[in-house]
Amino acid sequence: MEQTLLIKGGQIITPERYLSNGWLYIKDGVIQDIGSEDQIPLYEAGNTIHLQQGEYVFPGFIDIHIHGASGYDFMDGQEAVESIAHVLPQEGTTSFLATTITSDENTTIKALEGIAAYAKRPSKGAELLGVHLEGPFINPVFAGAQPISAIQVPNIEQFKYWNEVADQLIKVVTLASEQPNGNSLIDFLHNQRIVPSIGHSNATFEEVQLAIESGLKHATHFYNAMSKLHHREPGVVGSVLLSDLYAEIIFDGIHVRDEMVELAVRMKTSDRMILITDSMRGKNLSNGSYDLGGQQVTLNNGEARLNDGTLAGSVLKMNEAVRHMSQINDVSLIDLAKMSSMNAAQSLGLTSKGSLDVGKDADVVIMDRQFNVNQTIVDGNVVYEVEE
């Protein structure tokens, strides 16, 4: 039996234009047709959602860097993955990469096994797209909140084993290219169609250029935990600004100043920026102490920090990141859709997600003008609806 849904009204954000008072017709989890107010939809749908004038209809958010939420961390195992996937639609996220943290061998294996086990089950929330392996192939100089004791030099055989444990689900690997064997691992990942991402790195400008030649495609939480911009050594920051690398950004008003975000958007344009949360298990919870990779993190007034004051992830929600970005000069609604969905999909090589286009997966988030989430739709199914 076919399942149909018609979304009528609101401002539909496509890659090319806004459709005021438009409509979206969905059948069996796929967008079948899109129209504007001067085109009358001739479809009879099983369900119809009537929107208020001014509501935004965006492609569902894709969070490719998230560690946890609501008391759970992906390192905890299969049940944690399910719990996190269940709550993410509340912030408009329809798909995500389960992100690991640098840990000992047993903990890493347990996490990857749990994620792989969950992937075999039907999802009732946001869709798991795979794994973002953050560490352990990083530079201890820029460890950030990654446990230094478990950091390793890049190792292709070790990665192969972990990806086998993960049932080939690893899609992104954060590493420091300047470490021994770093470029060899980048070349290997690139040839396997896995995204190599520079992060937690002390690389020089020249070292990043070599990494780009080896297949580097991406930068992890841009500006944070990487060699800084200096007028005699551009470092990783300068390299990212001057390259075509995709750049993740944590836009919570804490990790990066607004002016630096604006600089990145102007230099790289909205085509190369990816909004992420990098959230940890304290998201959606009250102030207190929480675990991250075996370390105590104190959450206070929206800031998550280790005992020494180091930032330790965030409690940011994707719709909040979009709201923050909307306040940057000259950023349009189409730009916001690119940075919250399309660019992430393109960076992962996903052709069925990332935009409201005919033939794409029906992953949709409906928001008011303040970017508060009213409804979230995954594969044509309403998985979240705000309480009246």
Image (spheres, rainbow, N blue to C red):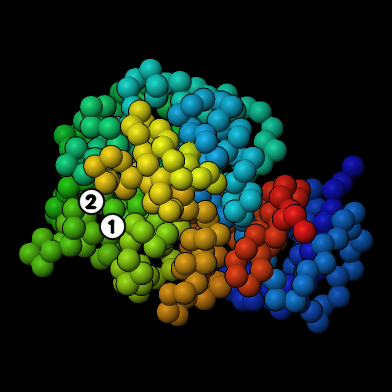
Write down the residue under mark 2: 226
Find residue 118 and report its horizontal and vertical position in percent.
59, 28
Q: Give the residue type that dot 1 points to.
A: Tyr
Work out whether residue 386 can be spotted.
yes
Q: Give the residue type that dot 2 points to.
A: Met
Quadrant where the C terminus sits is bottom right
Find residue 274 and report its horizontal and vertical position in percent.
44, 58
The part of the image, by quadrant, that contains residue 375 is bottom right
Q: Are marks 1 and 2 in contact (CB under 8 Å)?
A: yes
Count of numbered tags: 2
**Mark 2: secondary structure:** loop
**Mark 1: secondary structure:** loop
The part of the image, by quadrant, that contains residue 134 is top left
- The residue positioned 26% from the left and 46% from the top of the image is 309
Of 88 and 303, the residue lying toward us: 303
Write down the residue under mark 1: 223
- The residue positioned 45% from the left and 58% from the top of the image is 275
Query: Callout 1: 10 Å neighbours few (<14), some, many (20+)?
Result: many
Of 313 and 191, the residue lying toward us: 313
The part of the image, by quadrant, that contains residue 144 is top left
